[in-house]
Image (tube, coloured by chain):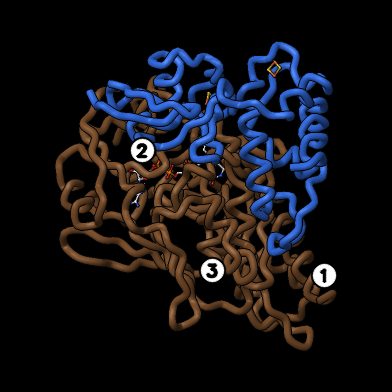
């Protein structure tokens, strides 16, 4: 690992001033950054520890939503009573990711900004447009079993690996950013960029911005929500496909539907097409199937990842079915 | 170089390390505490698990400087009936993963006692979660054992969790 200067920021103004130094990077739990630094994929000159910032609270908002400080550790977020009761899909998504050790280290902000797990991104001997702009993409004609089926381009087919973000997308979370220029609030849906012809441009964050918080809107339907993750082994593995879903049914008709997919695109994939089919439809197996079909129509497979299309359809219908059965039993 | 102090297994240690030195290397190379093992050095195996203020972390992805002034427990500082249970249930073969397994299990049992759910908990909102073999397997999935001693590991943890804790 290349040597670097190290400093600890104890307040937000200090952190956002320090990050304007060229070559500086924030350090959260380090579970992604330290790994990539050791592989010489990230090479910061200055590392700013932000875990001492006073951003580790989870607070109720006057409008019924929740504000989650960006330094809250993943395990603490999943363990929080209000998350477990009001937004169980978020607790489940976090618990489905990484390991107990890593979740104790990982911060909410770092989870949002974790880099792709495309094997070519992590291989300095391979071509990767994300890592080195214009060098090419070895995944497209190579090992692409884990690659995207939505929104990929001829320049990049990588996926975003976060489980937590899939739940946040379904919940319409807001990301709060702070810099010396002020505060911005952006929807999480759309925060991660599709690759287009600039796959090195991964999110809407500016290089000098700090994620300070994530806000969850008040969403009664989320009290009955589920996260389903399909992977090559039953634990401690990234998703092949995952589904975050929340539905509300009145008199047999679906009155609220939130659906997002993981493992299928460079962003947590909000399933708008499926939601359109579900809203106002009867809560039946047929509606669930039609919703899954509608969403997957736009999927484009590569040589090895075509299985994700059928897998995603089955994961969507299974999740909706489970929510429906649980709802009827309640 | 950074001059830091940390409490390791109860005694205050002074360290002079470059910021790029991991907590794992600081423990092993600088303090000579080689009980904590390096398996993958990328967060993927759990061999490097230590307890920080009682919480389990992967020390290979931790920069030592970030853990200044914290309370670290490595296997050298553990004396717990769980270790006897590991022996009784053959929870090891070569033993390379064992220090990490033990530290991880102690952290995991504290998480369970605090009411934390896991990915196999049917209803995450439940306040009382029975520590079944399935729960133990899931909660310990961050610790790989190349020798495949998993059945013994689960039995050892179950025994230890069942007795007065
Ligand atoms: C073996 C292994 C398995 C894993 N499995 C999964 C899995 O199954 N599912 C899953 O979702 N994840 C998984 N992960 C990834 C893990 O969730 C992320 O590494 C973690 O969430 C990152 O958080 P962190 O605080 O450690 O980030 P760091 O490593 O500290 O930072 C990551 C990036 O974010 C930047 N950053 C951090 N915080 C902020 C902030 N507040 N503002 C601006 N920039 C910031 C850093 O500069 C860096 O670029 C796995 C990781 C490992 C090592
Ligand atoms: S050595 Fe740290 S997880 Fe493998
Ligand atoms: S006992 Fe050999 S690796 Fe676990």
Counting residues from the start of the chain, the first of labels 2 and 1 encountered is 2
Identify the mark at residue A325; answer none if there is no mark.
1
Counting residues from the start of the chain, the first of labels 1 and 3 encountered is 3
The residue that mark 2 highlights is: A130
Counting residues from the start of the chain, the first of labels 2 and 3 encountered is 2
Residue A235 placed where, x, y %? 68, 39
**Residue A226 sits in quarter:** bottom right
Q: Is residue A201 left or right of residue A307?
A: left
Identify the mark at residue A171; answer none if there is no mark.
3
- Give me the residue at 36% from left, 47% from top: A51
Secondary element at image label 2: loop
Chain B color in figure = blue
Q: CA distance from mark 2 to mark 1?
A: 43 Å
Chain A color in figure = brown
Q: Is residue A265 left or right of residue A29?
A: right
Q: CA distance from mark 2 to mark 3?
A: 28 Å
- Give me the residue at 65% from left, 74% from top: A277
Nearest the viewer among A317 and B68 is B68
Q: CA distance from mark 1 to mark 3?
A: 21 Å
Nearest the viewer among A231 and B150 is B150
């Amino acid at each position: 690992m290349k040597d670097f200067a190290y400093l600890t920021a104890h307040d937000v103004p200090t952190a956002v001033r320090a990050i304007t130094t060229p070559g500086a990077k924030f350090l959260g739990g380090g579970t992604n950054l330290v790994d990539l630094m050791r592989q010489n994929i990230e090479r910061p000159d200055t590392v700013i520890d932000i875990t001492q910032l006073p951003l580790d609270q989870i607070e109720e908002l006057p409008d019924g939503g929740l504000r989650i400080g960006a330094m809250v550790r993943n395990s603490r977020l999943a363990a929080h009573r209000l998350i477990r009761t009001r937004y169980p899909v978020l607790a489940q998504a976090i618990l489905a990711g990484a390991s107990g050790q890593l979740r104790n280290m990982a911060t909410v902000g770092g989870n949002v900004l974790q880099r792709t797990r495309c094997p070519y991104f992590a291989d300095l001997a391979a071509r990767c447009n994300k890592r080195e702009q214009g060098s090419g993409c070895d995944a497209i004609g190579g090992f692409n079993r884990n690659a995207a089926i939505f929104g990929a381009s001829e320049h990049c087919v990588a996926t975003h690996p976060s489980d937590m973000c899939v739940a946040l997308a379904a919940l319409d979370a807001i990301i709060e950013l702070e810099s010396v220029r002020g505060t911005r609030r952006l929807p999480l849906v759309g925060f991660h960029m599709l690759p287009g012809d600039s796959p090195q441009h991964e999110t809407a964050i500016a290089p000098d911005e700090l994620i300070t918080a994530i806000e969850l809107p008040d969403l009664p339907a989320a009290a009955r929500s589920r996260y389903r993750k399909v992977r090559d082994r039953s634990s401690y593995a990234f998703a092949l496909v995952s589904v975050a879903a929340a539905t509300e049914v009145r008199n047999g008709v679906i009155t609220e539907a939130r659906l997002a997919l993981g493992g299928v695109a460079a962003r947590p994939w909000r399933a708008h097409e499926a939601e359109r089919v579900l809203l106002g439809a009867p809560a039946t197996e047929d509606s669930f199937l039609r919703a899954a079909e509608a969403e997957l129509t736009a999927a484009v497979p590569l040589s090895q990842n075509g299985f994700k299309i059928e897998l995603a359809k089955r994961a969507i219908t299974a999740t909706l079915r489970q929510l429906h059965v649980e709802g009827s039993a309640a | 170089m950074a001059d830091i102090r940390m409490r390791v297994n109860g005694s205050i240690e002074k360290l002079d390390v470059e910021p790029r030195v991991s907590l794992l290397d600081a423990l092993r190379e600088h303090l000579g505490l080689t009980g904590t093992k390096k398996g993958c050095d990328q967060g993927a195996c759990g061999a490097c698990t230590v307890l920080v203020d009682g919480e389990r972390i992967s020390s290979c992805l931790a920069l030592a400087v970030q853990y200044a002034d914290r309370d670290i427990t490595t296997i050298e500082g553990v004396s717990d009936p769980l270790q006897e249970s590991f022996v009784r249930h053959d929870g090891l073969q070569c033993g390379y993963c064992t220090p990490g397994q033990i530290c991880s299990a102690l952290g995991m049992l504290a998480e369970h006692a605090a009411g934390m759910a896991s990915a196999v908990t049917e209803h995450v909102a439940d306040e009382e979660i029975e520590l079944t073999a399935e729960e133990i397997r899931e909660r310990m999935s961050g610790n790989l054992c190349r020798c495949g001693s998993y059945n013994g590991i689960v039995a050892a943890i179950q025994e230890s969790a069942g007795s007065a804790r």
